[in-house]
Image (tube, rainbow, N blue to C red):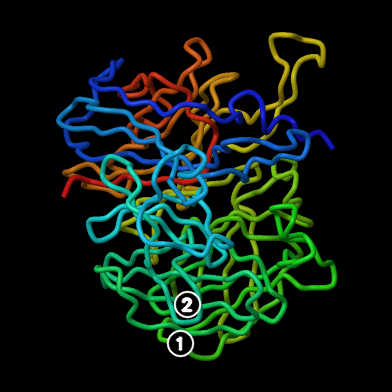
Amino acid sequence: MHLTRYTRGNFAPVTEETTAFDLPVTGAIPTDLNGRYLRIGPNPLGIEDPAAHIWTLGEGMVHGVRLREGRAEWYRNRWVRSASVADRLGEPRRGRPVDERFDFAPNVQVAGHGGRVYALIEGGLAPYELTPELETVGPCDLGATAEGFNANAHTKFDHRTGEMHSLAFRYGADFLQHIVFGADGIVVRTENIPAPTFPYLHDFGLTEHYVLVYTSPMVFDPALLATGVPFGWNEDLPTQLGVMPREGGRVRWMDLPPGMVGHTLNAYEEDGAIVADVVVHPGRFEVIDIGAGRPVLERWTVDLAAGKVRTELLHDRPQDFPRLNAHYAGRPYRYGYSASTELYAPASPLDPDRPDEGFSNAVLKHDLVAGTTETHEFGRDAAAGETVFVPSATAAAEDDGYNLLFVHDPDRGAADLVILAAQDFTGEPLARVHLPARVPLGLHGNWIPER
């Protein structure tokens, strides 16, 4: 199996931390974008076996751009200083002491909550707090519970109640935990959910009254711990959707075709049913070769009275990292955005100018009412990551705002922060902020507005 693409091209880690001020811009940054665009991803300090390395392994590095009043004030990239990262960089350890057996630099999500910034991971490993300038404060107890769980990477914020929700798993635990905490990050309640098959749980769904749990044949396997990817596919286990009241109680399980949910675009209630729009990896999911799958966008409609789920394909182009206007999370909505994840191959294995495989370079805007999709293509070798939607200051419609994402500029060998007008999605970018460094393909991020 060919895996070396994860150490070459724009998958390859960067080796230096960079700080730059007053960044050059092509176009004009909207003056109502005041805040920080942050994104995190694996950026290994060293790769022991390049032939076996995969994209999702490696210490987390955060990349950030500060925008204010039409200017790009700074760009920074920083490794999250876990104990081992600080030791390898020859620096003092940050924050309180930690159990080194379970200490890792989070690499999955970076988010703001209660005026603070957190780097998040999953599996019960501790989040880390960061300063506004991306320096590491230290490990923290965001969402920590007595059973050893922490806030999982994909937390959900409810703008109506001010609550933040997490559905967490912990390596080796035979139950999941629904964690609810307030604006100050303090846990207000928890609910344990039996999960005797030790499922891998990356994301979940949240509606006004329900929590949606996705389980699949992808399960924790302690025999694989030494590989760094302790999950395997057990053909004997079903793919299921669990529906639990937000206030806790019995989970109703419903069977689905084999596959695994990667991420939730949105979930909501309508006419007595639950609707969940999810990115699904059909069939067997290859955790070792994540680029080999063809994840698609599906709609699951849950008939609570009958206890059945109807599935519908919304779009068949391979895609992932779905996002929406977060003010519509958990309620009916119209627009969703995602990144294309289709692999292309080099024109020739002997072509010195195209030695590597890579992802196609587009982002998608789905109109889920009209049933149409717009595509913004960035061109060959211009690797594009997850896009984050930011409403405009005077938004009068759901898609009145901006899409922000990092895009590789192959001519400069560095990244641009691209700003699209969401209502002119296929048009020329409003602005390209030219960064002084490459931003490798990574995982998730968020816009943290100025308070």
Which quarter of the image is occupied by the N terminus? top right
Q: Residue at x 52, y 48 (%)?
A: 84
Amino acid type at mark 1: Gly
Estimate how packed mark 1 is, as few (under 14), some (14 to 19) or many (20 or more) residues with alpha carbons within 10 Å: some
Indicate whether 317 appears above or below 200. Answer: above
Q: CA distance from mark 1 to mark 2?
A: 9 Å
Write down the quadrant of residue 301 in the picture. bottom right
The percent position of residue 122, horizontal first and vertical second, equals 53, 61
Q: Position of residue 68 (x, y in %)?
A: 18, 32
Viewer-side residue, 221 vs 272 = 221
Q: Which mark is residue 248?
A: 1
**Number of other residues with Cα within 10 Å of mark 2, as a class: few under 14, some 14 to 19, many 20 or more:** many
Q: Disc 2 designates what residue?
A: 178
Question: Do tag 1 and tag 2 residues touch (Cβ < 8 Å)?
Answer: yes
**Mark 1 element type:** loop
Left or right of 221, for residue 149: left
Q: Amino acid at mark 2?
A: His
Q: Residue at x 64, y 69 (%)?
A: 310
Camera-side residue: 287 or 258?
287
Look at the numbered disc 2 and give the secondary structure of its residue: strand
Residue 153 against residue 435 in the figure, above or below: below
